Amino acid sequence: NVLGCLVMGLLTELMALYWSPSAELRSFMTMGVLGGFTTFSSFALDVGYLSSRNNNAGAMGYILISVVLSIIAFFSGSFLIKRL
């Protein structure tokens, strides 16, 4: 997860400042390749996107909701299996 987020940060800044690949190539590299490597990098990209647009409340809400719902879903799945 950490390596994927590092590469996502490097790649998105390179594309923003020095390199302008097509939208298709940008999506393939960020959501496709890195998203497949670690979905956490896609999560970090979404947070970065919201923050870069000065939507810090949205970014924090997205973080909170994603983490809390993921943990609730984990324990719900565990609970359901234990009840079988």
Image (cartoon, helix red, strand yellow):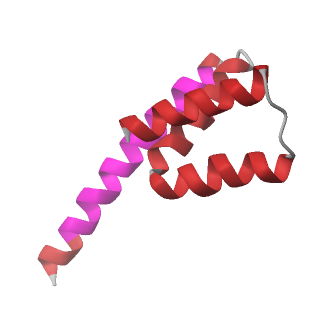
Identify the residue at image location x=63%, y=33%: 11
The answer to whether 18 appears left or right of 22 in the picture is left
Position in image of residue 8 (x %, y %) = 56, 35
Instruction: Looking at the picture, tell me which residue is in the foreground, 78 or 19.
Output: 19
Kindly identify the residue that appears in the image at 85 percent across and 47 percent down.
Answer: 23
Horizontal placement of 19 versus 69: left or right?
Answer: right
Write down the quadrant of residue 33 in the picture.
bottom right
- How far across and how far down the image is residue 18, in percent? 78, 22
Q: Is residue 11 magenta?
A: no
The quadrant of the rendering that contains the N terminus is top left
**Foreground: 29 or 67?**
29
Q: Quadrant of residue 19?
A: top right
- Please state, as top left, top right, bottom left or bottom right, where the C terminus lies in the image: bottom left
* Camera-nearest residue between 29 and 42: 29
Q: Residue at x 75, y 20 (%)?
A: 53
Count of number-bearing discs: 0
Decide whether the magenta segment is chiefly helix, strand or loop: helix
Residue at 70% across, 55% down: 28
Compared to 33, does 10 lie above or below? above
Q: Which residues are magenta?
A: 57-79
Residue 65, compared with residue 25, is above or below; it is above
Q: Position of residue 35 (x, y in %)?
A: 55, 52
Report x, y in % for residue 83.
14, 78
